[in-house]
Amino acid sequence: MTKEEVDIVFPLFEGYKNGKIDRHEFKNWVLRINCYRERKALGLTLFDTKQALEQLNKLVSAILIVVTFIIWLLLVGTSTTRVLLVIAAFLFGETCKTIFQVVVFVFVMHPFDVGDRCVVDGVKFVVEINILTTTFLKGNNEKVYYPNSVLYSKPISNYYRSPDMGDSIEFCIDLRTPAETMGRLKEKIKRYLEANSTRWYLVHHVVVTEIENDNKLKMALHCCHTMNFQDLAVRMERRSDLIDELRIILEELSISTVSFP
C-alpha cells in the first residue's frame, strides 16, 4: 500500500493512535469485517428456531389428537359426551389460548432473536428462545425464564435492532468558571471526538442543566456512539475512555470542584 492509502485505511481501525494499532484492535476489526458475531448469532437463531418448530409440531399433534377424540365423542353421542366436552373446554381452553399467544409472539411479533441484548422490566438480558418460554441470561450469567405468554404483553427494548445509540455523561464544575474556560472545554471535547471518529459521531452537545448548591454548575455531555449497545463491553470501554479524557481536560484547564455522579 502507498503512504496515501495507509493514511486513509489506518484511521478506520478503532483505537488507532500515533500511527499504530495493537493486536486487540486488529482482531476486533477482522471480526467486524467478517460479521463473525452476526453469523454466529444467526446460526444460534436457526438452531433454536428448528427446536421451537419441533416443539410446536408436538403441541399441534397433541391438540389434533384431543380434537379427534372430541369429534369421535360427538359422533358416538353418548350421554356423557356433554360432560366430557365441558371438562375438555375447561382443561384445554386456556391452554389453546396460551399456545396461540406464544405462536403469535415467537413467529409473528418476533421481537428478538437468539443473542440479542434486550431490556425487560428494567433489567438487561441476552436472549435464548423457546416455544413456550424464553430464557434470558443476565450479565452475571444468571438464567431467568419468562413464559412467552407473559412477554406477549410486556414492552421489550432490543439493543441489537436499534440504530447507533447516544450516551450522556454528567459532571459538575465550579460556578465561578470563566466563560472563556468553558469555551476551551467545549473545544477540547470537540477535538477528542474528531480524533476518535471511529467511536463517536462529531455531533454532540455540552449543556448546563442546572445550578447545584449555589456553587456548582451541573453539566452534561450528550454524544452518539458509532454503534448500538448490543456489545455492552465495547460501549463501557468507550464511555470509560471518554470520561477519563474529560477528567484530563478538566485538570488541564484547572477547573475545580468537579464531581461525576
Image (tube, rainbow, N blue to C red):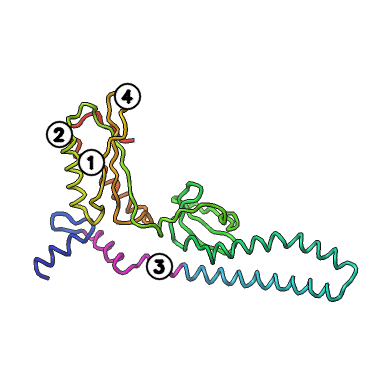
Tell me the magenta residue range: 22-44
Q: Check disc 1 and report the residue beneath it.
A: 246
Question: What SS does tag 1 mark?
Answer: helix
Of the numbered discs 3 and 4, the one sitting upstream in the chain is: 3
Question: What SS does tag 3 mark?
Answer: helix
Q: Check disc 3 and report the residue beneath it.
A: 40
71 shown above or below 106: below
Q: Residue furthest right?
A: 79
In this picture, residue 25 sits left or right of residue 55: left
Q: Check disc 2 and report the residue beneath it.
A: 180
Pick whichever, 149 or 50, lies toward us: 149
Contact between labelled residues 2 and 3, with CB atoms less than 8 Å apart: no
Foreground tag (3 vs 4): 4
Q: Check disc 4 and report the residue beneath it.
A: 213
Disc 3 and disc 1: Cα gap in Å? 36 Å
On the image, the x and y values in percent for residue 112 come to: 47, 61
Question: What SS does tag 4 mark?
Answer: loop
Residue 35 part of the magenta-drawn span = yes
Please identify the quarter of the rendering in which residue 147 is found. bottom right
173 shown above or below 16: above
Disc 1 and disc 2: Cα gap in Å? 17 Å
